[in-house]
Image (spheres, helix red, strand yellow):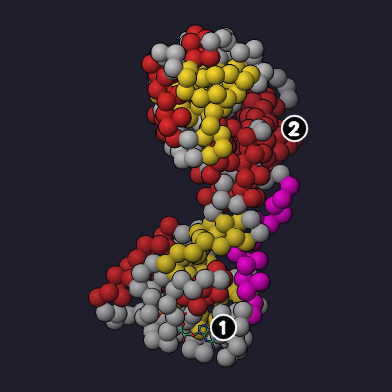
Amino acid sequence: MTRSTDTIVAAATPPGTGGIGVVRLSGDEVPAIAEKMLGKLPTPRRATLAKFGDDTGQPVDTGIALYFQSPNSFTGEHVLELQGHGGPQVMALLVEAAVALGARRAEPGEFSERAFLNDKLDLVQAEAIADLIEAGTGQAARAALRSLSGEFSTAIEALVRELTELRVYVEAAIDFPEEEIDFLSDDALSERLERCRAAFDKLLGKARVGRVLRDGYQVVLVGQPNAGKSSLMNRLSGEDTAIVTEIAGTTRDILRETIDIDGLSVELVDTAGLRDNPDVVEREGIRRAREALERADAALWVRDTTNPDRSIEGELPEGIPTLVVWNKIDAAEPPEAGKHALNVVSVSARTGDGLDALRERIRRLAGYRNLGVGAFTARQRHVDALNDAAAHFEDGRAALAAEHAGELLAEELRLAQLALGRITGEVSSDELLGKIFGEFCIGK
Ligand SMILES: Nc1nc2c(ncn2[C@@H]2O[C@H](COP(=O)(O)OP(=O)(O)OP(=O)(O)O)[C@@H](O)[C@H]2O)c(=O)[nH]1
Ligand SMILES: [Mg+2]
């Protein structure tokens, strides 16, 4: 049974002209509206050639009508799709006719929201629809499709099941304290705990990569003036975006270029060189550079082999993974110390030397290693909820280890489950739903 709702209508194809344009309706009134616009209710799931008329019986277009009877439709409600000629006037007339016959114009994401409310999709899958539509690379599109088909949701559900079993076990142990065996300190429990922890780690790793696949990975280039930050960005992107000169302090504004590294969308952010005693404009540039750093996923600290600079280490925010990039190796050798360190790469923006290695390092920094099979898209919201759940789980484990406190462990496990429930939408608020579906396009 679906809930009883008003009937919504919207063009499902983008505004503009095209060979075909689709208007979609969903709700209780669909059969009645279909009869008025088409003269009859089409057989469910059959492509039916029909004349589309307006509320007064005037013909608007001829096309294919598709009727899906509740509950066998995208939204779970009665759905009608009118595939007409893709012109903005045709679409507008069809929408207006439906409105005159009792439908209401759909809000952004309202079709998907109804699909969610009618249990056709969980929240992760509904979000994956938007992510698939907006995917910036082929990899991201494929990953979004995996989320849409439920791979991410299944992984979450498996983890929830693990937590539930663990909780049942712990609660049983608390309820029968007189049992001779102390269930709370036996190996079976610690094995389960270990298994859960491993499952958390694995899923968090995948969700982080999924987040990067969806949102892209932002890398800020910082360093002393003249180190070659702008040259490096131009070289990596193959564009001549940034001005390059031998004058220190050339770049003042923030410049951005997006590159594709094996399907990973990386946004490079070029910034003003950091130095003391800049002029007014440059000072503002440096302020912006620092601001960009705060928000970045990673930093490339570009250093000049021909002019080894003072360290700016203290100026890099903590917690942002940083790669040291020695530039201009065509002109001078990088200093021996740290040359082979893990977080150091040597390149020449002029000749292109070392850039493949640099791209590989960026890829690895993003956790984007053995991708391909099984990657799915995720959102920051999912990563946050997973982190939250993992923190409760760890608190519970710690409480058990320190105080043998089974009740505390059980409670933390419950909170961890709740946090995971927020990801799939088992636990949701109107505010959260409004925020998620409000970002969709109209007609989706
Ligand atoms: N030999 C050599 N010169 C380079 C290389 N990369 C950059 N340069 C030169 O170094 C100078 C500074 O390059 P930029 O790319 O403007 O340096 P920047 O770090 O963006 O400098 P600011 O914008 O002033 O902070 C220019 O004259 C470049 O031609 C390189 O790999 N080898
Ligand atoms: Mg520059």
Tell me residue 328's x, y (percent). 56, 85
Label 2 CA crowd tier, 10 Å (few <14, some 14–19, many 20+): few
Report x, y in % for residue 146.
67, 39
Residue type at numbered disc 1: Arg
The residue tagged 2 is 188
Image position of 145 with respect to 248: above or below: above
> Residue 84, percent across and down?
54, 28
Judging depth in this view, the residue of 414 and 187 nearest the camera is 414
Q: Is residue 3 visible?
A: no
Magenta residues?
353-373
Where is residue 152, by image quadrant? top right
Please tell me whether residue 352 belongs to the stretch shown in magenta.
no
Residue 350: which numbered mark, if any? 1
Q: Is residue 160 visible?
A: yes
Name the quadrant containing residue 378.
top right
Label 2 vs label 1, nearer the camera = 1
Taking 420 as reference, is 114 above or below it? above
Residue 243 percent coordinates (x, y): 42, 77
Query: Rounded to the nearest whole Å, what is the CA distance between mark 2 and mark 1?
Result: 60 Å
Looking at numbered disc 2 in the image, what kind of residue is underneath it?
Ala
Label 2: element kind: helix
Report the residue at 36% width, 69% height from top: 253
Please report the residue visible at 46 percent of the width from the left and 29 percent of the height from the top: 90
213 in relation to 190, above or below: below
Q: Residue at x 65, y 50 (%)?
A: 139
